[in-house]
Amino acid sequence: MEHSYLTSVIKQFEYYKSLGDKTLDRFTLKELQKEFEQDSNSIAIIIKHMVGNMMSRWTNFLTEDGEKEWRQRDDEFIDSFRNKADILDAWNKGWNCLFEALNTLAENDLERIIYIRNQGHTVTEAINRQLAHYAYHVGQIVFLGKLLRGKSWQSLSIPKGHSKTYNKEKFSKAKARRHFTDDL
């Protein structure tokens, strides 16, 4: 199915990864590790948490509980990155684990029951849960990026004051079924 749920949700995950990628590209290690308040999460810590979650949730996704015994969630909130390359490697490792799991699924898998902390979810529910979780954290990453850059931040979406121009371009195209990320 060309326009199935799986195709759409993979594009959604790719979109959120791209927002994170574009934000990470703009900063140094020191900036990625900046905490604005004591005990707040830096971009690096948010990434470490996301990667821990991704590795736990998507490793053996259909056959094991999504909260693995080997996961040390509390340690995810302690920044142990030594350089930016370590951050990027971890970020990509988590996303690769997710995409590998999703790419093995077929439409008939969507109603299967999987478990996260012994709570049953359909595969669809589990995917939706993680999509919302990762979008939430990518939003935090982008927001922290905006705080770090201040007025020099370049928008990752429609910049303020440019909605009419953006809409004019979109409405200049014929109606057609397409994903909103196809033009990005």
Image (cartoon, rainbow, N blue to C red):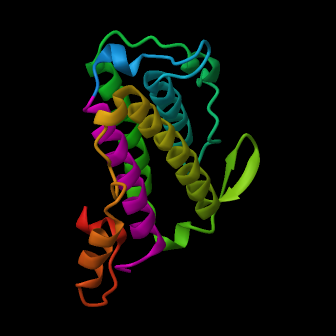
Tell me the quarter of the picture where residue 105 sits. Answer: bottom left
User: Where the N terminus falls, by quadrant?
Assistant: bottom left
Asked if residue 84 can be seen in this view, the reply is yes
- For the residue pair 126 and 149, the one nearer the viewer reads as 149
Image check: 111 left or right of 141? right
Above or below residue 83? Residue 106 is: below
Residue 158 is a magenta residue: no
Image coordinates for residue 64, horizontal then vertical, percent: 61, 43
Q: Which residue is drawn at 76% across and 43% down?
A: 118
Tell me the quarter of the picture where residue 69 sits. Answer: top right
Which segment is the magenta one? 1-26
Image coordinates for residue 54, horizontal then vertical, percent: 50, 38
Q: Residue at x 32, y 75 (%)?
A: 167
Tell me the quarter of the picture where residue 160 sits. Answer: bottom left
Q: Which residue is drawn at 62% across and 32% down?
A: 68
Image check: 126 left or right of 26? right
